[in-house]
Image: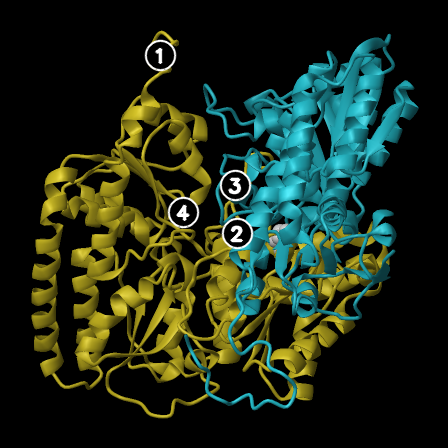
Amino acid sequence: MINIFWCDVAHELQWLPARETFVGVAAMSALKNRIESVLEEPACGKNQAKDAKDRKKGCAKPLTPGAAAGGCAFDGAKISLQPITDVAHLVHGPIACEGNSWDSRHALSSGPMLYRTGFTTDMNELDVIYGGEKKLFRAIREIIEKHNPPAIFVYQTCVAAMIGDDIEAVCKAAREKFGKPIIPINVPGFAGSKNLGAKLAGEALLDYVIGTEEPETTTPYDIAIIAEFNVAGDLWAAKPLLDRLGIRILANISGDARYHDIACAHRAKAAMMVCSKAMINVARKLEERYGIPYFEGSFYGISDTSEALRQIAKLLVQKGAPEELLARTEALIADEEARVWQRLQPYKERLKGKRVLLFTGGVKSWSVVSALQEVGMVITGTSMRKSTAEDRERVVEIMGTDAHMFDEMPPREMYRILKDSQADIMLSGGRSQFVALKAKTPWLDINQERHVAYAGYEGLLNLVQEIDRAIYNPIWAQVRKAAPWEGSND
Amino acid sequence: MAVIIHPKKSCAVNPLKMSQPIGASLAFLGIDKSLPLLHGSQGCTAFGLVLFVRHFREAIPMQTTAMNEVTTILGGLDNLEQAILNIYNRAKPDVIGICSTGLTETKGDDVDGYIRLIRSRHPELDEVALVHVPTPDYSGAFQDGWGKAVTRIVEAMCEPKPRTAWQVNVLPGCHMTAADIEEIREIIESFGLYPIIAPDLSGSLDGHIPESFLPTTIGGAKAAEIRNMGGSAITIAIGEQMRWAAEALQAKTGVPYRLFDRLTGLEANDEFLSFLAEVSLTEVPAKYRRQRSQLVDAMLDGHFYFGGKKVALGAEPDLMWQLGSWLTEMGCEIEAAVTTTSSVLLERFPADEVVIGDLEDLENRALGCDLLITHSQGRQAAERLDMPFFRYGLPLFDRLGAAHKLSVGYRGTRGLIFEIGNIFIEHLPHAHPGEWRLPGENHASPETRH
Ligand code: SF4
């Protein structure tokens, strides 16, 4: 595991061929230091409770070979940064990392489309034997010649790390040569989980991007939002509320962002941290380095959306915005809450008491729970696999019990629960949808691959409408009926 | 005759290609009670899995040895052993398909040696076929992975057996959909022959509703059937990528093979059905005689719209060959052909050049074409080019029914004529009054309308 000290390992390595050992250790120990530093996250309550040694290990659990699921660190970094729309995202590695996965998320852009272009060095056998650094440098040049983007992000992957390709050195050389930010994102997949990758991506922004440019103007109403990826347009469902209050999103990290926005993030007056799991290090360091106060909030659900608006206004006023912002915020909240409740009314009748099985993680585990309870639905179970201790606490707080929380649930068990009709709908990510569908149970995508925005008051209305549409679709009665020539219902 | 072009660029843009290990994994997904296990870091499996989930719209069983940087350097024996035991205890599969990745190949793990060691330590695994396929990500492409996996499957599982005259093996390439395989099975059975098809995605990933949820594949070629392939009269390989596997099966069991490089098009199917008639010593069934005449009629009705059309085609070599050759037979010209990996077919391909490249290469060469054909990742290019787009191949994630696209047999070919012909019809150019001006006339003159 990553928490074994590298020197111990290096000791074991003496019998290995010189090249692998030598370059591998040199390139990887720098990475290891950085991993340790993000794992030792002081803003994470769970981590503070541990002693020094445990703290270094962070929350990384060893994976079980043959029983592991989930993406790699590279995946997590890519998810976190790819939504920056005018940047070229270049993956340094063999075809597996980019070829199998490019352009597969729905983080939307209001302008540039370059982020949806898949760039990779597509390393071949010779690159693996002779090293891929020169190819990487040439790839950077090609991208600049063809697209001239404001910046290029270069992602490290396993094979390139293994053979000792030093992407930080290549990026530095390219930066000097082309006079343009070429940012190394040193996250080979085998370094750890998606979550770790997101944190390392955040570190890269802190090290290389944030604070390097200045906004044309600033206002007392400038905020940064952290870890909101504009999936299916989530950001746009919440932004009109901020617009109405005259609050400007100076930098959204990273949905629908431009490179320049992120580079100016240090001039925000306050920050909202949307997904604590993904990039808390960014929020904390923005506060540490630039005195930007932050809060953890969510735009999922009515009360969370209102609370987020209040917090933003409060922090801005603390930082010197005129106090009348508070009253204006309250007035907007009152209006908008009334408006959304009125529109929700017809659905409340239809969804009251409907049972939901919820598989998601992090911020969504509690904020969606509270959102669904707002319309009278019942949570029969929620998975906490990807959530932090605080997330758990909040779920308990909202539901009044932890009876319906579980960590892992094998698909077979999920299937049984649904087959026994212990839930009226399942909400989860795309991977487990077929467990629900094959059990002939309504299902709704709550994660990355959805096409509908769920954020803000409008988003909640969307979510509720989607749930209603799913549950009341006439196919369920038909597909659950056995063929006439088969005796019993299945 | 085509010239093969390797673009001199360091940065692949908008990849067409996918990696070998997931191609190999898909082959194992076509075997019943089997589980592909990628020997590498967990992310490789996650990406492959998501890709298949989106394409097939099915739950996909697929596992990883979950290597990290330290276990990689130390060697993967422990992780492989643990993974195999965990899978065995949880799922009791018949087959575990161990596909290596770039990471473990770079390190140089001796997986065959590991497997021997693991077998000697765990006699309980005797009943499980542990099939290892070396599939580094940094060479070859998806169809190579599939071809290698099937080769290793027959080498590992088939033995010579007494011959049965009416039993035939079918080794389909990865470009055959569930619907294609079903069609091939039906055709072969109608000649009174008994086909053993492996891998068989029509059994596992055809969208059926299983009775329960297992951590392995449910349906597909059964291990016991694969073991019987050594007793067949002949092997039918579909797609050039299957030549290795067919040859390996012949070498191991003596069963001869016949390779069909495609089953799309009138003559290709005439050849296939005459071959089956010969092997089975029966006549071509009335059903297929009728289907043949329907196809001929569709060609007559459709050729107006295909003739002279320029097509840009991006696909793996065997699929490119299948569609490109047939489109040429319908009167189209393949203006731009981009593929993923080398193949003996490329030189023979009916285009001036074939590029081993990416979707950027295709997009740049597609200008002025009437139709773009590639997998779903071509959607951005089609939009930018504002060009009619026929999605074909894997992945096909933004349309329904990927597994049920049919392109083989007389019936499948007929369907393709209608599907693609209708796209051409939809985009027929319409004349306007100013189109045929005489030389010297003022182009800006106002048009008289009637
Ligand atoms: S685990 Fe490594 S090789 Fe696999 S996709 Fe992630 S970065 Fe690429």
Toward the viewer: A31 or A201?
A201
Please state if B113 lies on the left or on the right of A87 as rendered.
right
Mark 1: few, some, or many residues within 10 Å (few <14, many ≥20)? few
> Type of residue at label 3?
Val
Same chain for marks 1 and 3? no
Q: Label 3 belongs to which residue?
A: B53
Query: Could you tell which of marks 1 and 2 lies nearer the N-terminus?
Result: 2
- Residue B193 lies in what quarter of the image? top right
What SS does tag 4 mark? loop
Q: Amino acid at mark 1?
A: Pro
- The chain that hosts pointer 3 is B
Instruction: Sort mark 4 into few (<14), some (14-19) or many (20+) by Cα contacts within 10 Å.
Output: some
Asked whether disc 1 touches disc 3, contact meaning CB atoms under 8 Å apart, the reply is: no
Residue A159 position in % (x across, y down) = 71, 56
Chain letter, disc 2 residue: A
Q: Position of residue B355 (x, y in %)?
A: 78, 61
Q: Which residue is mark 4?
A: A386
Location of mark 2 (residue)? A193
> Tag 4 or tag 2, which sits nearer the N-term?
2
Determine which residue is flagged by label 1: A484
The residue positioned 41% from the left and 45% from the top of the image is A429
Tell me which chain the residue with mark 1 is part of: A
Check disc 2 and report its element: helix, strand or loop.
Answer: loop
Chain for disc number 4:
A
Asked if disc 4 and disc 1 are in contact, CB closer than 8 Å, the reply is: no
Q: Quadrant of residue A42?
A: bottom left
Quick one: label 2, few (<14), some, or many (20+) residues within 10 Å?
A: many
Q: Colour of chain B?
A: cyan
Indicate which label's residue lies in the foreground, 4 or 1. Answer: 1
Lateral position of residue A311 relative to residue B266, left or right: left
